[in-house]
Amino acid sequence: MRFSRTSKALGVAAVLAMSLTACGGTSGGGNSAGGGNTSKAITANSTEPQNGLLPANTNEVGGGRVMDLLFSGLVSYDAKGKIVNELAQSIETKDSQNYTIKIKSGETFSDGSPITAKNFVDAWNFGAAAKNTQLNSYFFESIKGYDKVSAEKSTLDTMEGLKVVDDTTFTVELAAPESDFPLRLGYTAFYPLPESAYKDTKAFGENPVGDGPYKLAADGWKHNVSVTLVPNEKYKGPRKAKNGGVTFKLYNSPDAAYTDVQSDNLDVLDQVPPSGLQNFKTDFKDRFVNQPYAGNATMTIPSYLPEFKGEAGMMRRQAISMSINRQQIIDKIFYGNKKPAVDFTSPVLDGYDANLPGSDVLKFNAAKAKELWAAADKISPWPAGKVFTITSNIDGAGNKEYITAMANQIATTLGIKAQLNPIATFKQMRDLVNKKALTGASRAGWQADYPSLYNFLGPLYGTGAGSNDGDYSSAAFDAKLKEGLSAKSVEEGNKIFNQSQEILLKDLPVVPLWYQAVQGVWSNNVNTVQFGWNGVPLYYEITAK
C-alpha cells in the first residue's frame, strides 16, 4: 500500500496443509562492511506522516517507515522478500479459507502489557469498521463479515470471521478461499494494538505503544521536524535493533537531504534526487546502492472528472498515455535509472508478464495520440481554454522536474494546455487526493506492502479500495480479482490477475509511467547498510562507526 511504501514474490501457495513455522534472521546483500557501534543512534530521511500513527490508518511512506519499526505483526519480510515469523508460531489452513493462527506466548508491547490473540482480533475489527474511517480498511475485505461492518453508516464493531480461541490462538474465516492471504500478514494494517489504544485513538496516534524493534522516544514526534525512535528492550523478534536508535529527519527538499548526506549530517538517504543522479556513484563511491524494487510511478486521472467519463473519456486517457515519451524522461531526468512500464505491477514479482494484450497504449505514439484526442472531441469537445493539470507535491525527489517535462510532452503532442499544479508537501497532496477534490490528474505511485501481484491491483483499483485515488469502479475488473484470489495456488492466481490487467489497459484509471529502482546513499558514519525487497533500508541492521 502505500505511496512511494517486493523483490521476488514469495512462493507460498494456499495448499492443503500449509504451515508457516517459526524461523528468524534476515538476509540480503549490503554494500558496506560489517561491525560498528551498536549503541549509537543513526539518522535517516523521511517526510511528515500524513496521519496519526495507527496501523490501519497509515498508507503512505512517511508514516510507513515509522510504523514498520514501532510495530511487528504475525510475520515480516527479510531483505529478499522471504516471510519470517515475528509473533506467529504457526499459520495453518486446509482449504485456503479457514485459518488457525497461533502466536508466541510471553510476548509484550513496549509498555509491558501482554500480546494476546485478542489484540490482533480487536485491531483488525477496529481497522475494518466503517465508523472508524481507517484508510486501510480495505485490507480486511477478505474476512467474512467485512461487508457488514464496512457498510456506510454501519455501527457494527466485529467481523463474524474472526474468533478468539484462547490467549495464543485465533481463527480467521474468509468470505471465499484466497490464494495469497498469508502473504499479506506482514503489512502494517495487520499489526496488533494494545487495549490502551482504544481509550483515545487520536492521542495514541501521537504517542503509540507498539511491539516492534523500536519505541517512540519521549517527545519523539516533533511535527515537521523529526521522529525519534529508541530500541525496544522488550522486543524478541528477528529484527533486533543493532544501533542505539533511529531519528528520521523530516525534509521538504530531497536536495537538502542529499547535501546533508554528503556532509555527513545525515546517515542514510533512501532516494537520490535528480540533481544527484548523474554523479551519485562517484560522489559516494562504495556508499551507494542502485537496485530495482517492487514499486512503480503512475499518473491518476480520476473517474469523477467529467471530461474523462464514457467513451470519449477513455479515448482521452489513451491519448494522454501515448503522448508521453517515457524513455526520454527517464534518460534526461533520471539518467536512465528507471524502466518504462508495460503493466500496472512490477518486473521483480513472480507472475509478471511483459507482453500483456493491450499494452501498446503505454508506448509513445504521437500520431495515434492525436487521432484518439480528435475522435474524443467529436463525441464531447474538450472545454475551450481548459488546462490539463497534474497535481504533485514538490518536496519529493524529481517530482517537479519529471511532471513539468511530461506536461510539456502532452501539450506539444495534443495541442492543449498542460501544466504542473504544485503542492508544497506530500501530506497536503494526499489530503487533497483523499478528499476526491482533484480538478485534473495527480502524481501517484506504489511501493509494495507484501510480495504479490494482487497488492498492485486490488488496493488501488478495486471498487471502494482504500488507495483507489481516482474512484475507479469496474464490475468486470472486480470479478477477475475475486476469481484470482479464489485460485488454488499463487501461480494460477497470477495468471488471472494478469487477465484483470487487460481490463485496466483499456480503462486506464491511472497511466503507468515507469518501474522504480532505489538509488540510495549513506554517510561515512555508518556500516552494514542494506535496502530491502520494497526499496526501504533495513534500518535495524545499520550500525554507526
Image (cartoon, rainbow, N blue to C red):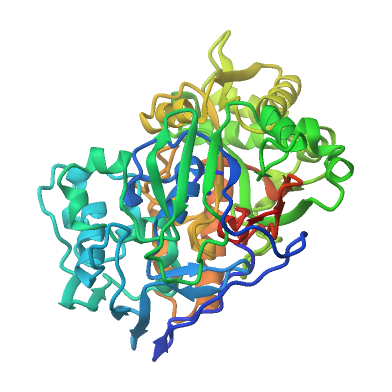
* Residue closest to the eye, 22 or 222: 222
Q: Is residue 274 visible?
A: yes
Q: Residue furthest left?
A: 155
* Residue closest to the eye, 522 or 332: 522
Q: Position of residue 195 (x, y in %)?
A: 18, 57
Quarter location, residue 396: top right
Q: Position of residue 305 (x, y in %)?
A: 44, 26
Q: Is residue 129 visible?
A: no
Report whether 220 appears left or right of 165: right
Q: Position of residue 272 (x, y in %)?
A: 73, 39
Number of on-image labels: 0
* Residue closest to the eye, 464 or 416: 464
Quarter location, residue 190: bottom left
| x 36%, y 82%: residue | 89
Does residue 309 sit above or below 354 in this rendering?
above
Q: Residue furthest right?
A: 282
Report whether 479 appears left or right of 526: left
Q: Residue furthest top?
A: 385
Report whether 317 appears left or right of 93: right
Q: Position of residue 132 (x, y in %)?
A: 21, 44
Report whether 452 appears left or right of 286: left
